[in-house]
Image: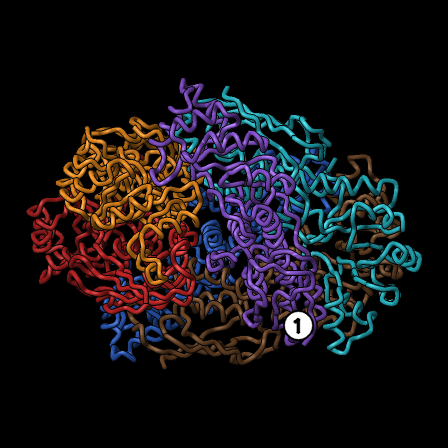
Chain colours: A cyan, B purple, C orange, D red, E blue, F brown
Amino acid sequence: MPEALPHLPAHLLDDLVLAALEEDGATDDITTRALVAPDQWGRGVFVAKDAGVVSGLPVAAAAMTALDEEVSFDTLVEDGNRVSAGTELAEVEGPLASILSAERVALNFLQRMSGVASLTRQFADSVVGTRAVILDTRKTTPGLRVLERYAVRCGGGQNHRFNLAAGILIKDNHLAAAAQLGLDDLRDVITKVRHAAPHTLRVEVEVTNLVQLREAIDGGADIVLLDNMGVEEIRTAVELVAGRAVVEASGGVTMENVRAIAEAGVDYISIGRLTHSAPALDISLEVAAA
Amino acid sequence: MPEALPHLPAHLLDDLVLAALEEDGATDDITTRALVAPDQWGRGVFVAKDAGVVSGLPVAAAAMTALDEEVSFDTLVEDGNRVSAGTELAEVEGPLASILSAERVALNFLQRMSGVASLTRQFADSVVGTRAVILDTRKTTPGLRVLERYAVRCGGGQNHRFNLAAGILIKDNHLAAAAQLGLDDLRDVITKVRHAAPHTLRVEVEVTNLVQLREAIDGGADIVLLDNMGVEEIRTAVELVAGRAVVEASGGVTMENVRAIAEAGVDYISIGRLTHSAPALDISLEVAAA
Amino acid sequence: MPEALPHLPAHLLDDLVLAALEEDGATDDITTRALVAPDQWGRGVFVAKDAGVVSGLPVAAAAMTALDEEVSFDTLVEDGNRVSAGTELAEVEGPLASILSAERVALNFLQRMSGVASLTRQFADSVVGTRAVILDTRKTTPGLRVLERYAVRCGGGQNHRFNLAAGILIKDNHLAAAAQLGLDDLRDVITKVRHAAPHTLRVEVEVTNLVQLREAIDGGADIVLLDNMGVEEIRTAVELVAGRAVVEASGGVTMENVRAIAEAGVDYISIGRLTHSAPALDISLEVAAA
Amino acid sequence: MPEALPHLPAHLLDDLVLAALEEDGATDDITTRALVAPDQWGRGVFVAKDAGVVSGLPVAAAAMTALDEEVSFDTLVEDGNRVSAGTELAEVEGPLASILSAERVALNFLQRMSGVASLTRQFADSVVGTRAVILDTRKTTPGLRVLERYAVRCGGGQNHRFNLAAGILIKDNHLAAAAQLGLDDLRDVITKVRHAAPHTLRVEVEVTNLVQLREAIDGGADIVLLDNMGVEEIRTAVELVAGRAVVEASGGVTMENVRAIAEAGVDYISIGRLTHSAPALDISLEVAAA
Amino acid sequence: MPEALPHLPAHLLDDLVLAALEEDGATDDITTRALVAPDQWGRGVFVAKDAGVVSGLPVAAAAMTALDEEVSFDTLVEDGNRVSAGTELAEVEGPLASILSAERVALNFLQRMSGVASLTRQFADSVVGTRAVILDTRKTTPGLRVLERYAVRCGGGQNHRFNLAAGILIKDNHLAAAAQLGLDDLRDVITKVRHAAPHTLRVEVEVTNLVQLREAIDGGADIVLLDNMGVEEIRTAVELVAGRAVVEASGGVTMENVRAIAEAGVDYISIGRLTHSAPALDISLEVAAA
Amino acid sequence: MPEALPHLPAHLLDDLVLAALEEDGATDDITTRALVAPDQWGRGVFVAKDAGVVSGLPVAAAAMTALDEEVSFDTLVEDGNRVSAGTELAEVEGPLASILSAERVALNFLQRMSGVASLTRQFADSVVGTRAVILDTRKTTPGLRVLERYAVRCGGGQNHRFNLAAGILIKDNHLAAAAQLGLDDLRDVITKVRHAAPHTLRVEVEVTNLVQLREAIDGGADIVLLDNMGVEEIRTAVELVAGRAVVEASGGVTMENVRAIAEAGVDYISIGRLTHSAPALDISLEVAAA
């Protein structure tokens, strides 16, 4: 259960939700306007059609209430809960027209976020009992990073640096650029970055082989990112590091190999597909005129 | 090949891309600032790592050039092209720091849009030779509907109504609401909608069984949406309609059953997963200091 | 009486109204600040100075309350009502300074929208008893289309397509462009559009003579727009169509000829001046310190 | 000819024009997309269909070029010029699809602004030879005040205070409020305002009779606004003021009585209908594929 | 005590405060999220650490409550009050996490505005008993002009023209430009400006010597701005004007010479450093878990 | 000389500068419009009136060119350069009216940023030869944090964490909150934060005495912030830490004591007044009609 639930502030959700409602033409829903009377009342229940982990109920609530203050939204489970097919997630009540016009936007957020949470939960469950923590990456949907990182936390993962301004990660392209400036010793690169960057940040270095790894450790890297290594190589790397740095693995992580990677002793496993390829969780809103 | 390529106007892309760059902290990329000199030049190539259909090159171009006017972006293939693993998609050249800081945002758009196009292409290929056209739905990512609909066109699909304001679709919830007002004959419902809505719109009615279908046809529905019907029932429905309305099928469509549905004679097949569950296409930017 | 009243959502009005108040310097009203004490209370009544149809009371309410939550606004008539000179439309009460600072913005919206509604009502009254429905066009004030379309509904008109994305209308320029591509048979043009556009849209074709009209009907146009035809030609056109398409007339419609056009049998008459040339309805706010 | 032409800065026009194009769905013009090829070239001429004064060519230019940098726009007359029916105003050339999609927005601005300029010109011509200057008011279209004030200048008028923050005007409601605070001598009111407001502003007082007028002059009003007075009363008022203050007349000004008011000797005549009730000038874009 | 307190409208403060909270990452405060439970309650007191004049309590209130509706904010003094070191200014209570996350933004506004008010108060106190009024200038912090002008009023100063659109001030650069056009008599320049500008504005002319001053007075300048003159020259200038224009002094005003300038008889003294160089007033928020 | 110069991206500057120009009414500069012809050309030079460090030339350039593409801006020194009174900083040339209307906004940015840079330079010069680095804080002007941090770098300082989302700093309020939850051992607090926060961040702990300092070091704090300690206590603290953590001092730092603090051996000294109380550097634009 995520401790982060209160950290989706109302005004942020309002902005996202109003933009989405406008995109969907929700304030000019011609079908509903033609058939539903302004004073008709309705009730609806959000129901999971598949098993998974729910995430995004505050966003769905914001979407359902943004068009109409008279709509009420009551959660029946909490974000981060595991649900089975058929579980009722939340109840909505108010002017029927408003409910129908906001339905799709609420579901679009809720299904996507729950999809991310559900996939994260599967990876997190796979490494239970090891020291490894599942992390997201910056491979998120443009505009929705705050929500998707929240969904990862709902699924039992943790968050990597928020963005380029909030953490240091020296990658191969940076090394090549530094070499071109005559700086080809990884230890010197680390020193240079440490001096230039805010002192509140650790220095993380991406390495693709054990030679680089040794240089990174010698140079005082706080974190090493083992990029696309096989399980055996990861195991060797962890032994080589021997606690002198935090170890993160990334690249090519699947449900099949994630446990083996975790058991190789890494501290963190970061997985792009948590956010770039999670299928939506099937959820529907079952509405009844009241 | 989509005829729609010119219809992603520059100012829209700029807005989306600048928001994403800001979200990613691209203007405060501390790692790059520490290691790459302002006057260092670089080149990079976008390369597909898997086979698929490319979509989003104009968006990637906007992202790569938004930070820095000196960056040039040249496409090597066109949106809508099928590519194999290893295909070079585009070339970027300019100040290396700007390229590195914009890389992730460019890829986040390009991978997602190409994922949508690739999945659409698979469905479209599956129905080749039938009359059926593959359609998207309103189950898109909040904020990205214009881009995802474009990606669907790149993959050989067509677009359903843009949003609630741009088309009429009478669903079960609307019927229930109308019944509550004493309007329980589907033909009367259709008449009421036709009078209230802009005369430029067709009237589409979602039906779940053949009884409803008959009423919809009798009532003069322009389009009938067969919701979650099996292939046999769809075939019967098509016969029953006998050309008096456009026929669209939706619900539970998979790569396994899509051809059978198409061969049952429908005009359109709309598929939510094109946009809500397409996995990203793996693409990377291979950069070299120049 | 418009069924559309609830469809001016609060957040849209807030955006429009806050922008207008800022434009008018309402938060820095130096005259009022100098002369009215913060705790002075006031009341005011919006009064029609001419006969007409009122439209925009929810907008005026939003304007009067946007600066100050303590201001209350009570409507005395409803949007869509016919009013005579001297009719009291709404009552406002609260801090006098806030009322005075918002007065002009509230009136600017209310007078314009009521002007549109009043002119529409005159046209609509002129065709009573015929089948013809009065429609607006896309010739609206930039930024105010939603409000002006609403005002047209208040005046007894209906709305044409919202914009270029929400409806198909093939005009002479499109035909010329198609001909240049070798597509000079109107029937082929219609077929091409039908395949490219969302299937939820009808195809409307503008014709300027009976030859074109015949081709449009043969090509399966759903709607024909008779552009700038005289009454006699319209009558002939209606007979020629013989129910095979919806018939809309436009161009040169005045209060003098609108009934004749209606009696010629068209389904719709669209009139640009409803929104581009309607004079404001004279309304004033009579304020008294309370 | 207005000296103000350069004072419609590009970024302001861009914001207004992009918002209007978005409102009109110009980037998703389905009819044009279906029929016009991306590489098809076109030319068009803006032609006045009625006599009047043109205003808004820079806005039309911004609208025509906002979608597509390849579109060129050349003016054939200048804002502020009198034109007769049939006069060609500007020429546009470029990708035909872009021209067609932006046409309506360009015309909506141009027709409205030219309507304001034309009506202003009529009033200004009516007072030629007198000392009176025609002024606008704050009764402008919400969101378009900058453009409409510019149009008034194009028509030979001048601008009143921009908004509540940019000028002082003591009206009857302010007097009533001040009286309630025990300040019922108009001279004291003027003194109070003069102390509270920026010293760069003149103090203007609205008066409805000669008693008030005397008090205003005694109190040192810089400008007196004669509200809704008849021509005789205005003449008396001008004599009474005898050059001790600037004199402005307003209220009930029509083309019939404007000259008489001017000849009564006032310095300024402010007219709300210039902006709230000017009919659009009829202008069309005649396009040809090139 | 400023009469202007009610003139910081809620929506303006909300916009400024939400932008500042976003800038400060207040909705993603990782330290607080890790250590403070969502249901932990807290109280805090804003305390002045130095003597001065307080300004900005409504802004601090907006900041503290923007993240969380459950936070309450009670003022213990009013804006414009003089406070000594140790004075409690306001009390805040609510969810502790929300208080901690908003603290810095609330203080950043409050300290800056109170710094401006305190410096203004020192200048205003220095001229007590003279006719001179202390004014601000346009040398404000970009984006914060409304707040800083308000702070000046809190400190006993008054405001100069809001901006370039709200007042006339002819400076040396304008004179040089006019001369280049052949207009080198200051009296003609004044006449030209008076005709071109809104009649609601006074004409202010900056002069740097007594020759220019005489021309300005002869030309009918309403206000003369004595730029960077010494005290003796100012005294002579005031005598020369002899009440025929308002007199403002500016340039090089310090706490040391301000009284002498005032006693030289000017009406206004405008001082850039009130807003561009006021040191922040030291204020802290003392929080206790409740 | 700051390596950060290229990191003020054009679109950010444009947004800030356009908002400031709008705030200043620069597009409706009535004085300039009255006196300067549209085709009048001018030149100007930005000149420092006091010695200091310049910062903000790219922002001034953006301001001078935002209104008018024809204005050119050429720098004569670079940001970060020390300048003496009389130094010419940049040259501007183009339409004179545009230069005059943008002058104040350009100067408001340039004077403030150069003020920050100049004060930072004084502090940085004071600690030359020690290991100490001068840092800014989060006590920046709302809305201008990016610019002020850049100015600090121009003055030879470095930047602390950007905001609450980009670094961890455990303060006394957090400790009190944790204690209330039963977590009163500082070591446990550090552990808890380390688990909850992104692994890319160091953990910084604010301590006010040596007892707390010992606990922080034992708990594995990466950075300790010595809050408001005297020089002697700081020296003792540095010895106690003995290289096991980075040491930062803050609170009550003045030009008088900064060198002593630096010589006490700390790594960083963070100073709020760099941004909240730096007086503006006096700079003027000397314009000549060309």
Left or right: residue F175 versus residue B3 is right
Indicate the chain on which mark 1 is placed.
Answer: F
Looking at the picture, tell me which residue is in the foreground, D181 or F133: F133
Q: Is residue C121 visible?
A: yes
In the rendered view, would you say E180 is above or below C154?
A: below
When asked about the image quadrant of residue D41, the answer is: bottom left
Q: Position of residue E147 (x, y in %)?
A: 48, 51
Q: Position of residue F161 (x, y in %)?
A: 70, 57
What amino acid does circle 1 point to?
Glu
In the rendered view, would you say A150 is above or below F244?
A: above
- Mark 1 Cα shell of 10 Å, populated few (<14), some (14-19), many (≥20): some
Q: Position of residue A192 (x, y in %)?
A: 77, 70
Looking at the picture, tell me which residue is in the foreground, A53 or B54: B54
Looking at the picture, tell me which residue is in the foreground, D198 or F94: F94
In the rendered view, would you say D230 is above or below F19?
A: above
Left or right: residue E222 versus residue D243 is right
Say which quadrant the C terminus of chain E sits in: top right
Left or right: residue C155 versus residue F180 is left
Residue occupying the point 46% across, 23% down? B177
Looking at the picture, tell me which residue is in the foreground, D222 or B148: B148
Residue occupying the point 64% across, 28% down? A89
When asked about the image quadrant of residue D62, the answer is: bottom left
The local secondary structure at tag 1 comes to loop
In the rendered view, would you say A101 is above or below D220?
A: above
Q: Position of residue B142 (x, y in %)?
A: 56, 44
How many numbered discs sit on the rendered protein? 1
Residue occupying the point 10% across, 55% down? D262
Determine which residue is flagged by label 1. Answer: F3
Q: Is residue D279 visible?
A: no
